[in-house]
Amino acid sequence: MATNGKVLVDTSAWVDYFAGGEQIVSALSDPIDDDRVVICGQVQQELLQGTRDEKMFAKLERELSIWPYEAETAADFREAARVYAHLRWKGTTIPAADCLIAALAMRCGLEVYATDSHFAHIPGLRLYHP
């Protein structure tokens, strides 16, 4: 599917972004300035579950609420399972959560921006390269 210019930012990139990582802040400046950043439930869950206390949870929840939200569908879960299985059959195992994020991104025509290499293994997924 063709990209629509929007970027689904993975948990790995958000962690570095919120830590003030200079390279990530710079890499996300254009999509943020152009209102092209999207968040999904899986990324939101991973970020929120990593908080240390209720105050940090509430603060991060507010910060994440500014980004447009793309919801996962039942079809995304099935496609994620297909992606996971096909990769595993070829000897590559990546986190199931990343397969779900990728399935949603492919359905919605989103590019994915991540700092880990898992997404590079997924055929048909468009990655954001700043």
Image: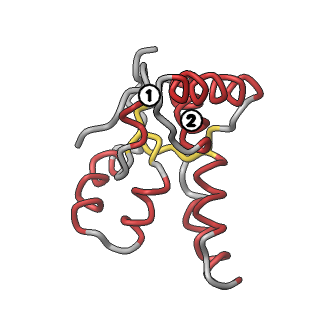
Looking at the image, the residue that sits furthest to the right is 74
> Which residue occupies the foreground of this view, 43 or 6?
43
Q: Amino acid at mark 1?
A: Ile
Amino acid on which the number 2 mark rests in the picture: Cys
The residue at 25%/39% (across/down) is 129
Q: Nearer the viewer, residue 114 or 9?
A: 114
Question: Which residue in the protein does label 1 denote?
Answer: 122
Residue appearing at x 51%, y 38% in the figure: 93
Which percent across, then down, holds residue 10?
47, 49
Q: Are marks 2 and 1 in contact (CB under 8 Å)?
A: yes
Q: In terms of image quadrants, where is residue 59?
A: bottom right
Give above or below for 93 relative to 83.
below
Q: Residue at x 42, y 19 (%)?
A: 124
Q: What number of labels is visible?
A: 2
Position in image of residue 30 (x %, y %): 27, 47
Left or right: where does residue 5 sit relative to residue 8? left
Q: Which residue is mark 2?
A: 99
Dot 1 alpha-carbon crowd within 10 angstroms: few under 14, some 14 to 19, many 20 or more:
some
Q: Is residue 54 left or right of residue 83?
A: right
Examine the image and state in which quarter residue 56 appears.
bottom right
Q: Residue at x 41, y 16 (%)?
A: 2
